[in-house]
Amino acid sequence: MAALAGVSNATVSFVLNPDSGQTISAPTRERVLSAVAELGYRPDRAAQGLRTGRSATVGFVTLDDYFGAFAGPTIVGAHEAVMAHDSLLLIESASRDSRVTTESVEDLLARRVDGLIFAVEGTRKVVLPDGARSVPTVLADCFVADGSLPCVLPDEVTGGYESTKLLLELGHTRLAHLTGNPSAWATRARLRGFRRALKQAGLNPADQIVLSGNFHIDSGHDLTRRVLAAGDPPTAFLCGNDRMAVGCLLALQHEGLRVPDDISVMGYDDQHSLAAELRPALTTVRLPYYEMGRWAAEQLFDGALEQLPAQTLLHCPVIRRDSVARPASGGRRSR
């Protein structure tokens, strides 16, 4: 390569390693790069790693038993950020079994990853193996109890607030909030936002319907039937996630109620291939899985993890579609 470019081996090395601090003229650099292209040269990553002390790899560990519906966007976000820094993402699917997680981390550390990202589906507290702290580590959609590792989380309080505010601005004052698992971090945070919006509108949260479910379709269906059977139904339902909203829509359809003509329905998550494909298309709140994955990876390359707050919150925007409208004039229409 040096001979083809008419330069020394040292000059080739300086061009291929811009961090060397050496200044190379533009014409010389062009000759070297042309020779690289002509010969199809690929840098030896292992040799570079020995010289720089970096492997140009990041480990991504999912702490769930399987890759759920939202793992893909998180991985894509992390992968794009890692690739932008000329590195690779190594993915390990662990589980809530601490032994499996420890083995996954040890495997990645044995490959000399430059940093680690831990991610879950459904925000929760996690316990990491000791080895996780031997390299820069960032958490996505999870956190450690003592806040000693930086994490990125969805701003669920604001998501609950803005979704409720949209319905209030449309004129709804009688709401039913069908939450997910009541012990879930996200459920508690969304309820805080729900109550904040109601209080700002001069409404008493205690006057609204709040029932706890389990984030599944059957839960949304059963809770909706219970609300309708009690009489004096709400003009809008807020559901703990998009799956519960599907159950809600099915129950309303069974009762001959039209959405959004007779009653409005809002989901949460903006689950791919679900919310936008329903008829009517579901108004919902988008969880920023892609953005969390990308943010987590970018922090590993910024070299300033110690300056980050314990928690960074990313906005959960309301996605307005066809399932909400102003309340029907004169109240709910009959069947």
Image (tube, grey):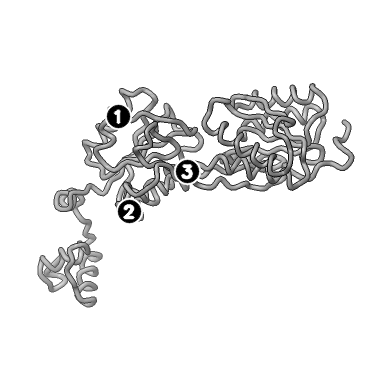
Q: Are the residues flagged by discs 2 and 3 in contact, CB closer than 8 Å?
A: no
User: Which residue occupies 44% across, 33% down?
Assistant: 67
User: Which residue occupies 21% across, 49% down?
Assistant: 54
Front label number (1 vs 3): 1
Residue marked by disc 2: 302
Q: What amino acid is found at the position of numbered circle 2 in the picture?
A: Asp
User: Which residue occupies 72% across, 26% down?
Assistant: 224
CA gap between label 2 and label 3 equals 22 Å
User: Disc 2 or 3, which lies upstream in sequence?
Assistant: 3
Q: What amino acid is found at the position of numbered circle 3 in the picture?
A: Pro
CA gap between label 1 and label 2 equals 24 Å
Label 2 residue SS? helix
Would residue 22 be found to the left or right of residue 286 on screen? left
Label 1 residue SS? loop
Mark 1 surroundings: few (<14), some (14-19) or many (≥20) residues within 10 A: some
Percent across and percent down for residue 221 are 69, 25
- Residues 239 and 61: in front is 239
User: Disc 1 or 3, which lies upstream in sequence?
Assistant: 3
Q: What amino acid is found at the position of numbered circle 1 in the picture?
A: Pro
Percent across and percent down for residue 129 are 29, 29
User: Which residue occupies 24% across, 73% down?
Assistant: 30
How many circles with numbers are drawn on the protein? Answer: 3
Q: Quadrant of residue 75?
A: top left
Mark 2 surroundings: few (<14), some (14-19) or many (≥20) residues within 10 A: few
Q: Quadrant of residue 132?
A: top left
Q: Which mark is residue 311?
A: none
Residue marked by disc 3: 73
Q: Are the residues flagged by discs 1 and 2 in contact, CB closer than 8 Å?
A: no
- Residues 214 and 257: in front is 214
CA gap between label 1 and label 3 equals 25 Å
